[in-house]
Image: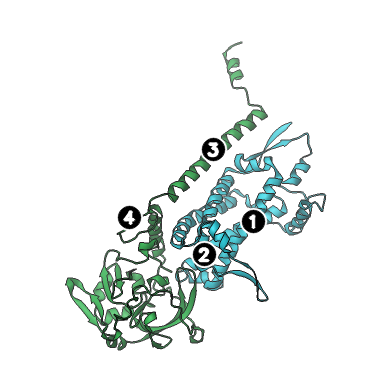
Amino acid sequence: MKTIKEKHSLAMRWCHWVNFPVLAIMIWSGMLIYWANDEYSIKLFGHTFFRFFPNGFYKTLNIPFRLAEGMAWHFLFMWFFAINGVLYILYTIISGDWRELVPKRNSFKEAWQVLLHDLHIRKIAPPQKKYNAAQRIAYTAIIVMGLGSVITGLAIYKPVQFYYLTWICGGYHFARILHFALTLGYVFFFVIHIVQVILAGWNNFRSVISGFEVIDSERKPAVQKIKK
Amino acid sequence: MNTPDKKKKVKKPLTVEQQISRRNFISFATFAVLAGGAYEGWRWLYKSPPEATGGITAGARKPLRKALNKTELFFRRVFSDNHLVKTYPKSMAAKNVRVNSDIGMEAKDKFDPASWKLQVQKKGGEILQVTLQEIMALPKTEIIYDFKCVEGWDQISHWGGVRFIDFIKHFQLDDYTKMDYVGMETPDKAYYVGLDMPSAIHPQTLLAYEVNEKPLPLNHGAPLRLIIPVKYGIKNLKRIGTITFSNTRPRDYWAEQGYDYYSGL
């Protein structure tokens, strides 16, 4: 028999889907800005492994010579990004949902077991509630990263007025590097996130839109849970 | 059967299957409508017309310009004379100070620094003319700070000159600081900036005539340039010709090209 199991609150779903396009616009406009001084690359022992970014990348995405435009977009959507993030954090605190979200003492050990399970090396996944240990770490990290983007962003946006933020971030140069690295982190997160959502299947994906999962009690729920 | 029973039949509780499909329908329909609305909103913003040229600001989409101006008002609240740009020891100053632009200084042959005089426009059309010697006679202030370009690069550089607020006080222009803006233009009027008064009279804003303890070369804006650490480089006008005061925004070269008028750091 099928039963409805509530999973994601309306507030969480709302914040998630507001954040998605807003963050996309922030990353795109950020690239328009970064292009004007695209000095970062991955170098090791004097050899350049990757330059951020190759010309073909810029051309394909129509990035060059749009600095002013990029800044105008960035400094409007930063408000939505920050406000949405603050609302989400407030919601998790007030509702108590943070308990499901924040890593526990054994989460780091368990996350390793989840990883081994997801890679089909280990057969049994550790027991979980709403989120497994790896999800707890990932979804908490992404919030910390969001906060980091706001702080490093302010540190390079108003380095004189918010000189203490610039100082905390290790100076103007380093704050800009952090701001850039965090963005790479989002892209990395996005790729893993999409793969996991596809692997987890429809029931899981639907719950982020409709809020519930359908539990078929004839099957063993543990099997389903492992996949999430 | 009597009436209450009939009602019960009509209001029969939904089966789990029905609940699932109903909730799915409502949430996915809402999602689709909101996603469509968001996409339309994006399209509207992306295709929104740019500001008309000929105004004080231009080149940005109208709603985005409005947002820039509103954001300026917010961040002006955190501006303070007590917030100073970080300064560095002399040993960290760049020996080769980057030259990024020569707009307003292209006519090199026609310009003679020796006969240059700073023109300060006062009320009633009166013009105060100041020579470089008069400016250099005022107390000198030096600053070694991280000059920041709107493009994203920065460089620690060493400048010397007179603080703008000292200049104002010496020439008894105090009344003009009650106005909202300062405008500065190159002698050929090809480059020009508008500055809000609090930033202009910030204690680290200099009328500079030295870089690395030597007189400014022409490409750095000889004989006198603006060094305003609370702004991006685009506001640090080289080769100042005229200074004006006003209560409305003076024209600004890069604000006409889609950049934020305030451009404050």
Image marks 1 and 4: residues in contact by CB distance under 8 Å: no
**Residue B67, position as x, y percentages in the image:** 40, 56
Residue B241, picture quadrant = bottom left
Residue bearing the label numbered 2: A35
- Select label 2 or label 3 by which is in front: 2
Asked which secondary structure carries label 1, the reply is helix
For the residues beneath circles 2 and 4, the answer to whether they share a chain is no
Per the image, label 2 sits on a secondary structure element best described as helix
- Check disc 3 and give the amino acid type: Thr
Give the Cα distance between marks 2 and 4. Answer: 27 Å
Residues under labels 2 and 1: Cα distance?
22 Å
Q: Nearer the viewer, mark 3 or mark 4?
A: 4
Q: In this view, does B190 lie above or below B136?
A: above
Q: Marks 3 and 4, how far apart in space?
A: 38 Å
- Crowding at dot 4, Cα within 10 Å, few <14 / some 14-19 / many 20+, comes out as some
Pointer 2 with pointer 3, Cβ within 8 A: no
Residue at label 4?
A: B52
Residue at image x 59%, y 51%? A92
The local crowd at label 3, few if under 14, some if 14 to 19, many if 20 or more residues have their Cα within 10 Å, is some
Quarter of the image with the C terminus of chain B is bottom left
Question: Which chain is cyan in the rendering?
Answer: A
Identify which amino acid the numbered label 1 is placed on. Answer: Phe
Is residue A139 something that shows in the picture?
Answer: no
Amino acid found under the numbered disc labelled 4: Ala
State the CA–CA distance, disc 2 to disc 3.
37 Å
Residue B247 or residue B240, whichever sits in front: B240
- Of the two numbered discs 3 and 4 on the same chain, state the one appearing first in sequence: 3
Whether residue B233 appears in this view of the structure is yes
The crowding category of the residue bearing disc 1, from other C-alpha atoms within 10 Å (few below 14, some 14 to 19, many at least 20), is: some
Q: Which residue is drawn at 41% across and 75% down?
A: B229
